[in-house]
Amino acid sequence: MKIAFLGLGIMGKPMATNLAKAGNEVKVWNRTPKSVDGAQAAKTPAEATEGAEVVWMCVADTAAVERVLFGADGVEGKLRKGMIVVDSSTISPVETLKFAERVRAKGADYVDAPITGSKVGAESAQLIFMVGAADNTLKRLEPLLGVMGKKVVHMGEVGKGQASKISLNLQIAMIFEGFIEGFELATRLGVNPERFVELVQNTMVRSGVVDYKAPFVLKRDYAPNFPLRLMRKDLHLVQDASKAIHLRLPGLESVLGVYEEAHKAGYGDQDYAATLALLDKKLG
């Protein structure tokens, strides 16, 4: 299949690599030029889109998706009937619906397919996709999704993938914050860190978030698998969505305050696990 893959960050580059390895004809574009083995590099999103059957995006935020789609050198002018535009970024559910309407006006279809699984999942083709799409469109994409991931959950029509993703990330941030605050309390009361993690992993507190992040926490390793600045961005998306439906989320207010403080302290480009570094810094 002919694919334009736009956005070669922590998640996008391994996704594009796996598509190329599977024998697809892949053209790639990134704001800062990067290469992908087996793929042809393009200078603009429009150039990458020329002749493509599927346009796949994985960029930083809502504004970046809008620029890639509708900017001066964007995708819009190359859209044609039968094409599918897929967005694996994490962006606003409301803006997703607006983008989909503009894309469909050109005869193409639109799918929101945000991902979870972090850097390791992208590299090992073990991502989980939460998809908002029409049934027949999703069926056309299944071979590509299978090359990049281990699970596809069809959440409903367009927009429901993004709604699910921001709700999921809210839970991830809150679960992790609960874990590290308990971890910090226990260890500062003299509990062995490894034994505390062992305890957590053998009780009802255990979670996938803890299983994945605990080794990094024990080593104080904050190399970015999922940068804190992006989790902060996602929490703001949750805040915007909840305000739009007049839903107060007290837990969100607390955890977003932590991320704002961590961002101001300079941890934005480190992994979101660096909220622990903020705690360490405050406590000395």
Image (tube, grey):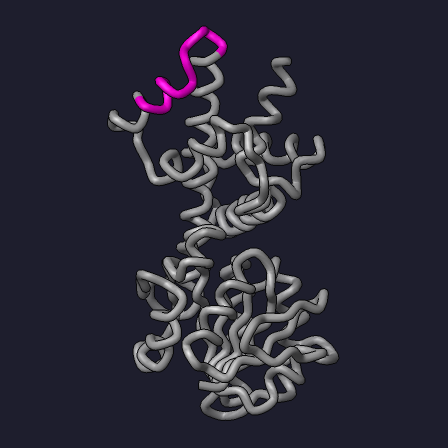
Location of the N terminus by quadrant is: bottom left
Q: 48 or 23, which lies in front?
A: 23
> Quadrant of the rendered structure where residue 18 is?
bottom left
Tell me if residue 194 is in the magenta stretch. Answer: yes
> Quadrant of the rendered structure where residue 145 is?
bottom left
Residue 64 in the image: x percent, y percent? 65, 64
Q: Residue at x 43, y 13 (%)?
A: 186
| Residue at the far front in the pictured view | 37
Location of the C terminus by quadrant is: top right
Q: Residue at x 62, y 44 (%)?
A: 229
Q: Residue at x 43, y 40 (%)?
A: 172
Q: 53 or 42, which lies in front?
A: 42
Residue 34 in the image: x percent, y percent? 66, 67
| Residue at the far right in the pictured view | 72
Against 177, residue 77 (above or below) is below
Residues in magenta?
188-198
Residue 243 in the image: x percent, y percent? 53, 47
Residue 72 in the image: x percent, y percent? 74, 79
Q: Quick check: can you spot residue 74? A: no
Q: Quick check: can you spot residue 137? A: yes
Tell me if residue 148 is in the magenta stretch. Answer: no
Classified by dominant secondary structure, the portion drawn in magenta counts as helix
Q: How many marks?
A: 0
